[in-house]
Image (cartoon, helix red, strand yellow):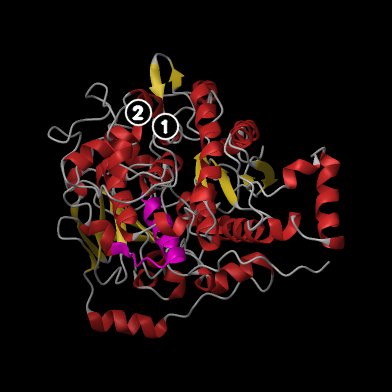
Amino acid sequence: MTDRRNTDRRSQAWFGAQGRSGMLYRSWMRNQGFGHEVFDGRPVIGIAASASELAPCNAHLTRVAEAVKRGVWQAGGLPLQFPTMATGETLMRPTAMLYRNLMAMEVEELIRANPLDGVVLLSGCDKTTPAMLMGAASVDLPAVMVTGGPMLNGKYRGQDVGSGTHVWKFEEDLKTGRMTEEECFFAEGCMARSNGHCMTMGTASTMACVAEALGMQLPGSAAWPAVDSRRMETAQAAGRRVVDMVEEELRPSRILTREAFENAIRVNAAIGGSTNAVIHLTALAGRVGVELGPDDFDALVREVPTLVNLMPSGTYLMEDFCYAGGLPAVMAELLGGGLLHGGPITVTGHTVAENTAPAERVGSDVITPLDAPFQPAGTGIAVLRGNLCPDGAVIKQSAASPHLLTHRGPARVFDSPEAYHAVADDPDLDVDENTVVVIRNAGPKGYPGMPEVSNVPLPAKLLKAGITDMVRVCDGRMSGTGYGTVVLHVTPEAAVGGPLALVRDGDPVVLDVPGRTLRLDVDDAELARRREEWTPPAERYVSGYTWLYTQHVEQADRGADFGFLRGGRGHEVPRDSH
């Protein structure tokens, strides 16, 4: 084994200290059974674990941490596990997104405040992955991401069932009488049948793939199911590798370059990934000083076809994706077509091109070849502009209905998602298939937290009439497991006076996705008059974290991060008070 002792390491400001301070640090650590030899200057590796039974996607990460520890010990480091909060989208109210920035702050400060030379980040659910990446990027110590892996495929009456995606489908079946309450209750237990995060290409799977595409996760590790033994092998390998990264001083700032973000954006298009990646990548870029805006997510994907046939846009699930070659196979296809940068360095110490060289695509149904894609180029995320969204809005074309991508219809306006849900089942609700449902006050400041409420279910009377989709427009987000013709992230949001606040029932809304526009066909003078009449909503919070959030959160086009967290703050060792 290589001798990795180094008295100049960051951790030695604690464990190598002389006198009372050193004695205090070492002696208290020894109450856990560590011998004196582990404080000899070897790399100290933090294992940031977001395990929590309140975040079902992350509940198994304690076991994953044990595998990481084995790898760190193998490589001659000292592993020290510490807990972080877990922002689980499935249970947290009003939305886990409200707490992403808080978790990022916590991860950043825990890494900086403790005697660590490197860190392994264990995440699972939607917001834990970007939060950990944001926090680690701001400290800039060597870091490797290990996501917890997807659940096994759901199975119900001989068909594959996708978490999240089939929630919406089963709800529609229940409303139209195609399923009974008892059948729905039984199907619940068929949907989530193992540890892990959503096995559709929802936000959790998307962000795992994005972390790998950025170079922050070991190749192939995004797709192994949570309960597959190779998930633990991957975690152990990450533990070994981070010790080497400390020696090499391979930090996030060397990995998270403009080219790496461009790769991640194109990969997101190729996998049919979640629109939430736009928000999270923009926020992460802000932490490392890379300029990234909504238009990048449009321009960079126009030539990228959708290669992955997964729910909610397709048929298969993450377990199938894994066995078909996983993300390395997708990246190899893109690289071969000149759609990726091959040069960026990754956590392996090798380039993207070197990592993908051995990749193999198995079959052609789950991961399709570039010359015969699942969906053609131009079906990824589109960014819209217009008088209804001057700072941008997004739509996931691969999950939308083609006949609605160009549409004009009268607005039916709801001042909150709750206002819509209160009348959605009313048989006399004044809507038809041409109506554009507008949901406002669901943005970062307005809700608060920008929840996943934009893809509201269709009115019951339309579902019963056989209508399966309609245009919906909202300043909130949509679950990555969701589908439909839904315009999201309308910016500026209604709560800060964005044009969405001025829409009234009956106003013609014009959606032109090929032309990249979303506009309100109302005279400018009339909109100006309405603006004069508009008054901002009263402040609902006067203290606590939610007050902090509403005061400092930026708009969606800036990643909904806190303005005071943009840029990095480094890893300088805090002053010793002992």
Type of amino acid under label 2: Phe
Between residue 225 and residue 446, name the one nearer to us.
Answer: 225
**Magenta portion: prevailing SS class:** helix
Q: Which mark is residue 350?
A: none
- The quarter of the picture where the N terminus appears is top right
At 86% from the left edge and 42% from the top edge, which residue is drawn?
Answer: 31
Magenta range is 275-294
Name the side, left or right, on which 514 lies relative to 577.
Answer: left
> At 21% from the left edge and 69% from the top edge, which residue is drawn?
521
Q: Which mark is residue 321?
A: 2
* Mark 1 residue type: Ala
Identified at 51% across, 67% down, the residue is 568
Left or right placement of residue 114 versus residue 88 in this view: right
Q: Is residue 5 left or right of residue 519?
A: right
What is the x, y in percent for residue 124? Answer: 53, 40
Decide whether residue 279 is among the magenta residues. Answer: yes
Position of 460 relative to 576 (above/below): above
Mark 1 nearby-residue class (10 Å; few <14, some 14–19, many ≥20): many
> Compared with residue 314, is residue 25 higher up or lower down, i.e. above or below?
below
Residue 562: x percent and y percent? Answer: 52, 68
Q: Secondary structure at mark 2?
A: helix
In terms of secondary structure, where does tag 1 sit?
loop
453 to the left or right of 304: right
Let me know if residue 288 appears in the view.
yes
Circles 1 and 2: CB atoms closer than 8 Å: yes
- Which label belongs to residue 223? 1
Query: Which quadrant: the C terminus?
Result: bottom right
- Residue 125 covered by magenta stretch: no
The spot of residue 62 in percent (x, y) is 65, 35
Is tag 1's residue or tag 2's residue first in the polypeptide sequence? 1
Quarter where residue 414 is shown: bottom left
